[in-house]
Image: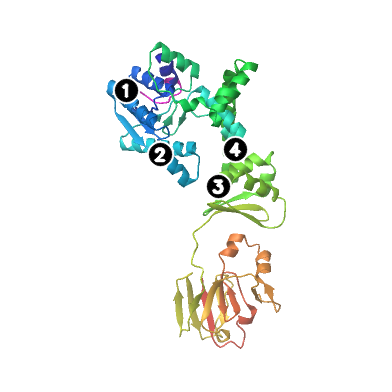
Amino acid sequence: MNIKDLITFVEDRKIFSRENHILLAVSGGIDSMVMAHMFHESKFQIALAHCNFGLRAQDSDDDAEFVNKQALHWHVPFYSVKFDTTTVAARKGVSIQMAARDLRYEWFEKIRQEHQFDYVATAHHLDDQVETFLINLIRGTGIAGLHGIPVKNGTIIRPMMFVYRKDIEQYAVLNKISYRIDLSNNGTKYLRNRLRHEIIPLFCTINPEFTHVLTESIRLISDFEQIGKRTLDDWCRQVLKSKGKDYLIDIGHLLQTAPVEPYAWAALAPFGFNETQVSNIIRCLGKENRRIFRSSTHRVVKERTQLVISPIEPMSNDKPYKIGPFAHGKKVSKPIKLLFKKIGQVKAFEISTDANIANIDFDKLSFPLMLRRWQPGDAFYPLGMKKKKKLSDFFIDQKFSMKEKEQTWLLCSGNDIAWIVGHRIDHRFRVTSATREVLSIVL
């Protein structure tokens, strides 16, 4: 491994250009010190950034001073920070490693933006790739966890992903590179260290080329994942039909795919649904009853022929709203806009067939009227019928979706429903030959 290999890898993979300013994440260990040396020798525009996690007492402070001296020697900018990682991990209820990772990347991005660096470079290499693959395999993260560490992910770049640890060690010896040794890396307390010191060497006794073979397999998995992702993205664009803020999926279309799981996952995962929820949704597709599933941001309602994906809206003001008596006309703007008009010339009046207009016998109303949402157990006498009908049954007959039911308002007179707003009036409040005044209500 030499400088030309780094430059060739960077140029071939289009990781960055010479015009870019790169913030190097340098711990002081052999990997990051070799990366920093190669970048310096390549005349790239760099600065060094170091995180002190305060986990190794004086050794942690010595690491920071070591990296600082190297930056001074090269006459490049140096940025450092010290974290109380243990306290942060306890407060968030996460592991020390997870807390350190989050703190590190959040701080790198802060420095990158403040000082206008184009990228942050970490010293991950191919052995890290193998270890990460095995960790994800053990933990069961699915295909997404098996494609390895990306060389470029937004503003994070990993320009050392063309070499193995042994190449880095050899380079350090040939170029007499000083570095700090973290003795905690020699233990097997953490899973990554156990894989590095015990499991991977065992595989290498079976196949000395194990790490090279696995690296190639990871590359192939990544390639096929990209092909599969493009296929699923194309399918989602065809199947996901937008309707206002909602998205609709035809259940028949979904059931025609084989296997159903990856297609359903591709469609629903972007809305926050996890693997278990997607499996439960798939199981109910062929059933008649309505089902509801919720993620942190969206809701999926399984209707008769389609899945309806809706954003979970903040709680709206659905409190009942009173409408007091009036002489001739009245406008209501909340919770919905309604125009009320009393009409005395009944003989010349023509009843509208528009569902958004209700014509009601004014004398049959008891004020104040009430606008409210429907409730389980509500019933009314649909216009033209002398028999009471539950609203839930009316909604089913009219093929109301869950969202349509939730957005329906009722205009009530006392305890009776006078109008399912925008749909049907109650037969008891209809205009007859005996009507003296009509109340016309326009939605």
Look at mark 1 in the image and give the residue it sits on. 70
Colour approach in the figure: rainbow
Front in this rendered view, residue 79 or 82: 82
CA–CA distance between discs 4 and 1? 48 Å
Identify the disc placed on residue 272. Answer: 3
Q: Quadrant of the N terminus?
A: top left
Secondary-structure class at tag 3: loop
Reading the image, the residue beneath label 2 is 106
Q: Which residues are magenta?
A: 10-18
Residue 225 is left or right of residue 86, and the answer is right
Q: Mark 4 and 2 residues: CB-CB less than 8 Å, in contact?
A: no
Identify which residue is drawn at 72% across, 50% down: 286
| 83 left or right of 262 in image | left
- Crowding at dot 2, Cα within 10 Å, few <14 / some 14-19 / many 20+, comes out as few
Q: Nearer the viewer, residue 222 or 180?
A: 180
Task: Please name the residue that numbered disc 4 is placed on.
Answer: 232
Marks 2 and 1, how far apart at CA: 24 Å
Q: Are marks 2 and 1 in contact (CB under 8 Å)?
A: no
Q: Residue 370, position in %: x, y?
A: 53, 77
Q: Residue at x 44, y 15 (%)?
A: 5
Amino acid carrying mark 1 in the image: Gln
